[in-house]
Image (cartoon, coloured by chain):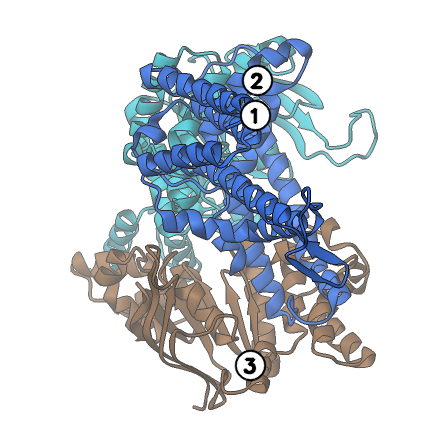
Chain colours: A brown, B cyan, C blue
Amino acid sequence: MEPILETRQLSHIYSPGTPFEHNALRAVDLTAYRGEYLGVIGRTGSGKSTLIQHLNGLLKPTSGQVLLNGTDIWSSKEATRAARFQVGLVFQYPEYQLFEETVYKDIAFGPKNMGLDEGEIDRRVREAAAFVELDDEILEKSPFELSGGQKRRAAIAGVIAMEPSVLILDEPTAGLDPAGVERILGNIQAYHRARNATVIIVSHSMEEMARTADRLVVMHDGAIPFQGPPREIFTHAQELEEMGLGVPQITRVFQRLRALGAEVDPSVYTVAQARDAILAALGKGAV
Amino acid sequence: MEKAIIQTEDLRFSYTDTDAQEGAPLVLDGIDLKIAPGSFVAVLGHNGSGKSTLAKHLNGILLPSGGKVYVQGMDTADEEKLLDIRRAVGMVFQNPDNQIVANVVEEDVAFAPENLGVPSAEIRRRVDEALAMVGMSEYAAHAPHLLSGGQKQRVAIAGVIAMRPNCIVMDEPTAMLDPVGRREVIETVKSLNQNYGMTVVLITHHMDEAAQAGRLVVMAQGRVVLDGPPREVFAQVERLKAVDLAAPDTVELCWQLRQAGLEVPLDGLSDEACAQVLYDLLRRQRA
Amino acid sequence: MAIKDITLGQYFPGNTVVHRMDPRTKLLFTVLYIVALFMAGSPLSYGILFAVLAGCVLLSRIRLKVLLRSMRAVIFIVVLTGLLNLFYTPAGPGESPLLSFWVFRVYPAGVWAASLMVLRIILLICCTFLLTYTTSPILITDGLESLLGPLKKIKLPVHELAMMMSIALRFIPTLIEETDKIMSAQKARGASFDTGNLVQKAKALVPLLVPLFISSFRRADELAVAMECRCYHGGEGRTKLRQLRYAGRDYLALGFGLALCAGIWALGYLGL
């Protein structure tokens, strides 16, 4: 696999030289590959927000590098600008950044800042809106008339319209109900597949990450103690618990089941896997 | 039957002012609910089910378009009784930042008793007691904006307890918190209910939180669709799915096994109970 | 981020005599000091006032560096007033200009007036900074509410004003954090806040200000409901967790403040 975005020994210190000095990142090495769906998990204050703001050049490293397609994003003005547009960043509660008169204009804000022509902007706005399932009628409405879920999707479309090759989302499902969560995750998945875009989702929901991500990166205290496929990560149940993260409920159930003496696969982390594991143990095969 | 602390009778509500208006959508459509003193009731529903609107009726922030709400026998529409009603039923909201009024923790907790004209020495006692009840005594002199989300929400809870209410209604108090913050708040709520006999109404869309309650009310389209102990309510997987809610993963797993033709009970709600159900299943089938 | 570095009006917690003094005393003393400052005219009276302030700074253990650093924010005003006095003070009797270029003439009287004015402003600013550095905003609000209490009789909404002030203080850090967040979010969409001419810069603020206003209104709305839920119904019948009480040191400080005023006045009267 081909790396698209890398950090090398990335460190960041807030307010250096003051009593508020804080080491938010400590020599972080992270690689995101082209077309992968990466989950970053950590609790509030673990450094995950600081990390993602380095990936599109919003924050400048105290030391270390951020490489986009092998080029240091701080090596030239052009490289920094390219990172800003190629790495799309959706902040937590993005609906609070909507400001235009219409949803259409708001989604067009990013493409406009990129200096694209009218025709291209229009194409991008409409395609982005389609990814998040907002129809033409909604595009002409004021963003402030929309429902909570629609606002969130409109805000995400505003970043998708920049057609980033890496799409980063900070807690995109925070505060939504189960139906809203599924819809947003589906929209992100659609963009991911259609464009072979790299997606990096930051979350503290283990269940959600377990279902969607190809690979997980665990952040704790400004460093990455574990990374790998979910199956591997969730074998560190004890450590994850100590970091205030925990493992998916199904994994916990299966750990108990094994403790009771049943011989089942211990690396199960979704309901579907659990069902198949039980059926397999009963000799019925997967359905 | 014990006298209810809160009782709604055929409660109907629509956001358009005149209930005479034909065709105005009813957000609440005939709710009959009795909350017993000392109980812990969770209200579950997706966004737009009317659960938050219901919460706002329980201490008279909103008044019914039709039907009645009684708090300890007082009609919430009786303006003379408003202060007594507000003191009897405390309310905690989703965003802790927007309910903390002072820039010192103890000052904030003192806010409600100050409004009630409680003498200074007594306020001091209540503040200390309320902070102890939520485990925040050591933060009495801190600035709220420097606390974590879970800690802020506990301060908000203390601010309500300081009124010495008989019941506390929480409108999605954990929606903006990370897993550690959520756990802090839910543990606090459980302790208030178990150790101090406080009646709790918890509005949520998190299954795992709802599962901790003694009674679970499921709402959809402004009506109560299911009502009973969580174990029984969650076992009705089809009916939950019909109103766009999912069962917790534990129950969902058992239900899927059932769909595969196995005889599995659906009341294994907790990790332990579910593991036991699965263990029994494996042993029975093998025998 | 520049907005985070504002120290103006900041409070530095401490436990010195100055910190523990009743906020009303500090407010009144500050007022008395300022009155004395405006009565002062001679080097001797300025010397006394300087010594008094220096004493207060020493007692409060606020570091000189901190005080000087906060002067930076107002240096413009100080320099401007100094220059105005320097150039626009007319010649004293029989004085010839020390300096003259273009339309400006600088006379010895101007130098004298400018230095006194600059000293006066510096002392004025330092004494108000000292007040905010040693008194928490909430105590200042409490103090003001209590001092202005009698004005309720003439229907001045003293309690409401105090409540507004303390809520504004409470939300300043929250709003600063929010501004930071929205700014980053719009930057991520390619917005730039620091390039272009003045008009472009002003236009660039729209994506920041609109969300900020909307969220402030939402916060205000939610806060109002939360306050009502906690039985807020105005200032009537309200009690306080912390009651302000004058102690011996407060009377001493107030007496000293009055004596200072009288003394400076007397010095002026005697022409010293």
Is C209 placed left or right of B285 in the picture? Answer: right
Measure the alpha-carbon separation of dots 1 and 2: 10 Å
Q: Residue at x 47, y 30 (%)?
A: C138
* Residues at marks 1 and 2 on the same chain: yes
At label 1, which amino acid type do we have? Ala
Q: Residues within 10 Å of mark 1 (few under 14, many from 20)?
A: many
Residue hosting label 3: A80
| SS category of the residue bearing label 1 | helix
Q: Position of residue A217 (x, y in %)?
A: 36, 72
Subunit of label 2: C
Q: Is residue A231 above or below residue B251?
A: below
Task: Specify the quadrant of the image occupied by residue C268.
Answer: top right
Residue hosting label 2: C148
Looking at the picture, tell me which residue is in the foreground, A282 or C55: C55
Q: Residue furthest front?
A: C94
Q: Residues within 10 Å of mark 2 (few under 14, many from 20)?
A: some
Residue hosting label 1: C162
Measure the alpha-carbon separation of dots 3 and 2: 55 Å
Q: Nearer the viewer, mark 1 or mark 2?
A: 2
Task: Specify the quadrant of the image occupied by residue B67.
Answer: top right
Q: Residue at x 64, y 22 (%)?
A: B10
Q: Residue at x 59, y 86 (%)?
A: A78
Q: Position of residue B72 (x, y in %)?
A: 50, 12
Subunit of label 1: C
**Marks 1 and 3 in Cβ contact (< 8 Å):** no
Looking at the picture, tell me which residue is in the foreground, B150 or B218: B150
At label 2, which amino acid type do we have? Leu
Q: Residues within 10 Å of mark 3 (few under 14, many from 20)?
A: some
| SS category of the residue bearing label 2 | helix
